[in-house]
Amino acid sequence: MILSLLVSTLVGAPGSALAETSPRAAIASQAIEKVIRPGYERLDKAGEAEAKAFDTLCAKPDEAALVAARQSFGELAQAFGAVEFITFGPIAEGSRLERYLFWPDRRGAAQRQAQIIVNRRNADAATSDLLPRQSVAVQGLTALEYVLFGAGSDNLTSQAGAFRCRYGATIVGNLGQISDAVAEQWRNPNGFAGRLTQPKTSDPVFRSPDDVLALFLTTTVRGLDEIGDTRLAPGLAASQGETPSNLFLFGRSGHDTAMLVADIEGLRALLAQSGLLALTPGLSLSPDTELGAVAVSIRSLGPDLGSVVQTKEGRAKLAAALERIKAVRVVLADELAPALGLRIEAARAAP
């Protein structure tokens, strides 16, 4: 989840900036007002709903309360998916992104460590001021998935799951603190948002609107790489007969498809609603339309991608989706970026 970017902006021909300053400068405001701020507000509200669901579950554990908490988990995960690609700004402070979602988790650290906490009833992990001192693997959504859906989660319907419920509630509370702080910081027009909407030559990173465009475009390209590399490719690489549900994020809870679609739709929204695509018409394909079609195709596969990938037809559809995502990435990097006078080099995320 660590994003390492090297972005450089090519200087346009003399006089060309005057004609393009207004639409280019508007991209940041539109991205913030239409995508980023609403996205984090939705995440904050989803966290509040999950917190209420856990309050009910822990106070009066029963089947209905567990179903409600599990449903709220899916809504929280999707809300995060819509803004997961935003790896810059307030979310990058204090390892917030890694604390919210520990992924990729090829060794199953989140489930293993969360299981140890539950089995040993580690009180520190169920204390709001001490949980942030634990491994990031046991603080976020993947650990919460174990609490709600992992082995022994049926105990949450009775007092036998009291500690497990308290640990889950602590995770949700800490996630709520993160989303609330991030949403509040994005509301501040003089904070990071101000750096994007009012770039200055004195700013070490955002000296002009083109620097901001480079950030958004590189973020989208990198986000598409992440979807391909950490969400689709591992499952497609699993051998036939293997159960790869753990290779698809939230495959154990049945929220894998919804999360993947949320990721794609989030990137699509940044491209389209910011007005970035409108700056350069005439691309060889429409990234907006193509990503929308990919989302529809993946959604049609149902919630269990681990089973889908075991079938010839399902595997073919996921492979086709991956190729279409790669095609969009090529258009953005090789057509849109040069047309805007931007050169982008996005380094791979650390394993």
Image (tube, rainbow, N blue to C red):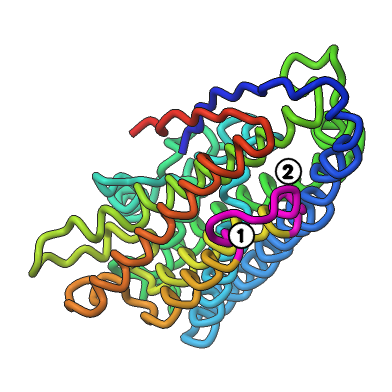
Residue at 54% x, 60% y is 285
Dot 1, crowdedness within 10 Å: few (<14), some or many (≥20)?
many
Q: Are marks 2 and 1 in contact (CB under 8 Å)?
A: no
Q: Position of residue 227 (x, y in %)?
A: 42, 52
Q: Amino acid at mark 2?
A: Val
Secondary structure mostly seen in the magenta stretch: loop
Give, as a single range, the part of the protein colored magenta.
Answer: 273-288
Residue at 48% x, 65% y is 259
Vertical position of residue 7 compared to residue 289: above or below? above
Tell me, for residue 166, which label it has, or none.
none
Q: Amino acid at mark 1?
A: Arg
* Residue 99 visible in the current orientation: no
Based on the picture, tell me whether residue 41 belongs to the magenta stretch. no
Q: Position of residue 4 (x, y in %)?
A: 50, 27
Q: Which quadrant of the figure has residue 253?
A: bottom left
Based on the picture, tell me whether residue 278 belongs to the magenta stretch. yes
Residue at 32% x, 46% y is 105
Residue at 25% x, 59% y is 235
Vertical position of residue 154 compared to residue 7: above or below? below
Residue at the disc numbered 2 = 182
Q: Which quadrant of the figure has residue 161?
A: bottom left
Residue at the disc numbered 1 = 268
Q: Is residue 153 left or right of residue 271?
A: left
